[in-house]
Amino acid sequence: MATHRLQDTGFSPEWAFQLALDVLDAAEDLTAQRRPATPKTLTPLLRARASGRRPTLPQLQAALTQVTHWREQVLTRDLLAHRRQLLTLRARTEAELNRLSEDVAYLTVMVRETDAVLRQSWRAPDDAACVERSGPTAGPPSET
């Protein structure tokens, strides 16, 4: 029985899957710009994002074919729409986290500056002066 073996490209299946996802994202960016998603138009986008190995044109074509297949199938088309929603929510959440981080940093500086002002005006209490300033204590009044 003959088995069909994929051409060994030296890249792992995980890398090929990630390439397909990268092609999907880049193709969506191109579509939003009303530009066609072809291996030639995808190459500069993917090279700007890529880390590690650079895909060849045949690898890009294979990934683009996979993306087209995903878009044509009902179930995977729905999954792609859901993935796009998740990515949008993640981007919004990351932006909110960045804004909150800036707020935390600002508030931390303000607390430190306030503490510094308080520290400069703080005097170590000496017992006699402390009693004199604080007034009578919670005990019975002393008659002298």
Image (cartoon, grey):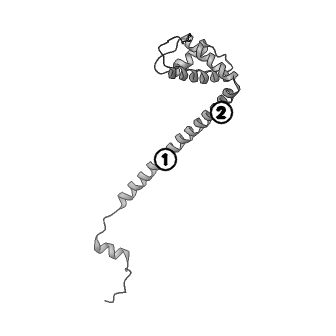
- Front-most of residues 139 and 40: 40
State the residue lying farthest toward the bottom: 143
Task: Classify residue 112 as left or right of residue 68.
Answer: left
Local crowd at mark 1 within 10 Å, few (<14), some, or many (≥20)? few
Residue identified by numbered label 1: 104
Task: Check residue 82 in the rendering and tell me which mark sits there, or answer none.
Answer: 2
Q: CA distance from mark 1 to mark 2?
A: 32 Å
Among the 4 quarters of the image, the one containing residue 70? top right
Mark 1 touching mark 2, by CB under 8 A? Answer: no
Q: Residue at x 47, y 21 (%)?
A: 51
- Front-most of residues 129 and 24: 24
Residue 35: image location, x then y, percent? 67, 17
User: Judging from the image, what secondary structure is the residue with disc 1 in?
Assistant: helix
**Residue kind at label 1, given as amino acid type:** Val
State the residue lying farthest toward the front: 1
Residue 109: image location, x then y, percent? 44, 48
Local crowd at mark 2 within 10 Å, few (<14), some, or many (≥20)? few
Task: Classify residue 77 as left or right of residue 128.
Answer: right
**Residue kind at label 2, given as amino acid type:** His
Q: Residue at x 57, y 40 (%)?
A: 93
Picture layout, residue 112 above or below residue 14: below
Q: Residue at x 52, y 40 (%)?
A: 98
- Front-most of residues 54 and 68: 68
Picture layout, residue 82 above or below residue 135: above
N-terminal of the pair, mark 1 or mark 2, is 2
Residue 58: image location, x then y, percent? 56, 10
Q: Quadrant of the C terminus?
A: bottom left
User: Judging from the image, what secondary structure is the residue with disc 2 in?
Assistant: helix
